[in-house]
Amino acid sequence: MNSENDRFLEEGIKRYEVARDTISAFEKEMAKILDQAAKNRKNWRPLNKVEFGRQSFDRSSGQNGYWVGITIKGKSARGEKVV
């Protein structure tokens, strides 16, 4: 490669690394906030015996964009397992 392409690729890689680190920091912080919000909720009616799974970060194209979710498991009033 020529030196112009090398500089271009080097700059692109640096920008990618900054963006990747920013997204990683965002996901970690959002995971903390989501976990805290779920655990601080006092009432999960109609669920009983609530347990929390791991947070997940999903990406989608189009208008749905980017979202964060958490798995919540419990039992219904009839004793059925609910996820």
Image: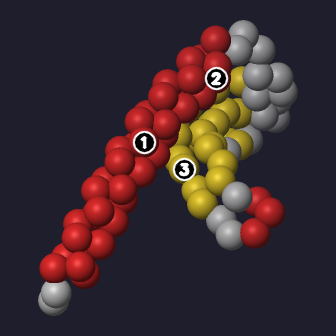
Q: Nearer the viewer, mark 3 or mark 2?
A: 3
Q: Residue 32: image x %, image y %?
A: 49, 25
The residues tagged by marks 3 and 2 sit, at their Cα atoms, a distance apart of 16 Å
Image quarter of the N terminus:
bottom left
Q: Residue furthest bottom?
A: 1
Q: Which secondary structure, mark 1? A: helix
Say whether residue 31 is visible. no
Image quarter of the C terminus:
top right
Q: Residue 8: image x %, image y %?
A: 29, 72
Question: In the image, 17: left or right of 36?
Answer: left
> What's the residue at 80%, 63% (across, down)?
63
Q: Which secondary structure, mark 3? A: strand
> What's the residue at 59%, 28% (across, down)?
34
Residue 3 versus residue 68 in the image, above or below: below
**Mark before the other along the chain sequence, 1 or 3:** 1
Question: In the image, 40: left or right of 19?
Answer: right
Q: Tag 3: residue type?
A: Phe
The residues tagged by marks 1 and 2 sit, at their Cα atoms, a distance apart of 24 Å
Q: Tag 1: residue type?
A: Thr
Residue 58 occupies quadrant: bottom right
Q: Which mark is residue 83?
A: none
Q: Which secondary structure, mark 2? A: helix
**Mark before the other along the chain sequence, 3 or 2:** 2
**Mark before the other along the chain sequence, 1 or 2:** 1
Determine which residue is flagged by label 1: 22
Tell which of 33 and 71 is nearer to you: 33
Question: In the image, 4: left or right of 71?
Answer: left
> What's the residue at 29%, 62% (across, down)?
11
Determine which residue is flagged by label 2: 38
Q: Residue 53: image x %, image y %?
A: 52, 38
